[in-house]
Amino acid sequence: MRPILNRRVLQTPPKSTMRLDPARHCPRCRFAPAFLALALSAAPVLAAPPRPAAPPLQGVVTEVVDGSTLAFAMAGQAPLRLRLRDIEVPEACQPGADDARRALAERAQGKPALVQLSGRRDAQGRTLAAVRVDEADLSRRMVEDGFAWSTRSKWDRGPLVKQERMAEALHRGLHGHGGQLSPTEFRRRHGACPAAPRK
C-alpha cells in the first residue's frame, strides 16, 4: 500500500504593510517623487551646450592713449575706449610710459583690428578686450617685445608670465634699461601717479 502523505494547506502569508503604505514606514519616501521631478526638470538645463562666444568686432584702431589703452571704431559708430586685457604697462609718471605708448602705436595705430570684448570694465571704466592686429594678439605681443608685464594677483602668476620672463631674459624693450620696475612694484614703492585729466 502506498503511504498516505499528509497534505498541508499552504497559507499565503499576509502582505507586508510596508508595501501597501511606504510613506507610513518611511517618511522620507514621500518626498521622493518631488526630488525626481526636480531632477528631471533640471536635466535639460544641465545638458544644454555652452553659449558660443560672440563674434569679434571688426573696425580700426583710431587712437592710442597709452601702452594699454586705445580707441577702436567700427564703421559708422562712435569709438570705444578699450584696455588691453592681461597686461600692465608703466604708469604715466613712471619711466618707460612713453616708450610703451609709442610701441603700441607702432603696432596698432590706424590699422584694422578684431576685438573680442570681455564684458568687464576696469576702475577707470575702460572695457577690457582682446585686440588682434595683423593676426597677432596685441597683449601678447607687447609682453613678448618687453613693453608690458603680465597681470598677476596674489593667487595667479598671470597668463603671460612665460612671455614676460623670456623678454626679461633677452633684455627686450624696457627690460634693456637697468633697474626697470614692473608697474605693480612701482606703485608699491612710490604710490599711484596723480590722476591725469581724461581726454
Image (cartoon, rainbow, N blue to C red):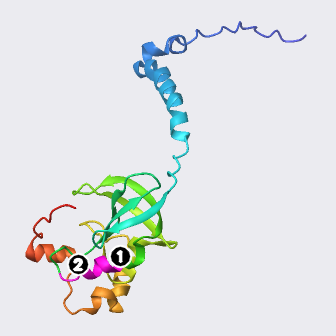
Question: Which residue is depicted at the point 51% across and 28% down?
Answer: 41
**Does residue 193 appear to the left or right of 140 in the view shown?**
left
> Which of the 4 image quadrants contains residue 13?
top right
Res. 162 in view: no
> Which of the 4 image quadrants contains residue 8?
top right
Res. 153 in view: yes
Considering every residue shown, the one lying at the far right of the view is: 1
User: What is the chief secondary structure element of the magenta stretch?
Assistant: helix
Q: Is residue 100 magenta?
A: yes
The Cα atoms of the two marked residues, 2 and 1, are separated by 11 Å
Question: Which residue is depicted at the point 41% across and 63% down?
Answer: 130
Residue identified by numbered label 1: 104
Considering every residue shown, the one lying at the far front of the view is: 76
- Identify the element where label 1 is drawn: helix
Q: Amino acid at mark 1?
A: Leu
Q: Nearer the viewer, residue 41 or 60?
A: 60
Q: Where is residue 131 drawn, in percent x and y?
A: 43, 65
Q: Is residue 193 magenta?
A: no
Residue 185 tag number: none
- For the residues bearing labels 2 and 1, Cβ distance under 8 angstroms: no
Q: Amino acid at mark 2?
A: Ala
Quarter of the picture containing the N terminus is: top right
**Does residue 112 appear to the left or right of 168 in the view shown?**
right
What are the residue bounds of the magenta stretch? 95-103
- Identify the element where label 2 is drawn: helix
Q: Where is residue 5 drawn, in percent x and y?
A: 79, 11
Answer with mark 2 or mark 1, whichever residue precedes in sequence: 2
Question: Which residue is depicted at the point 29% across and 76% down?
Answer: 101
Above or below 138: residue 53 = above
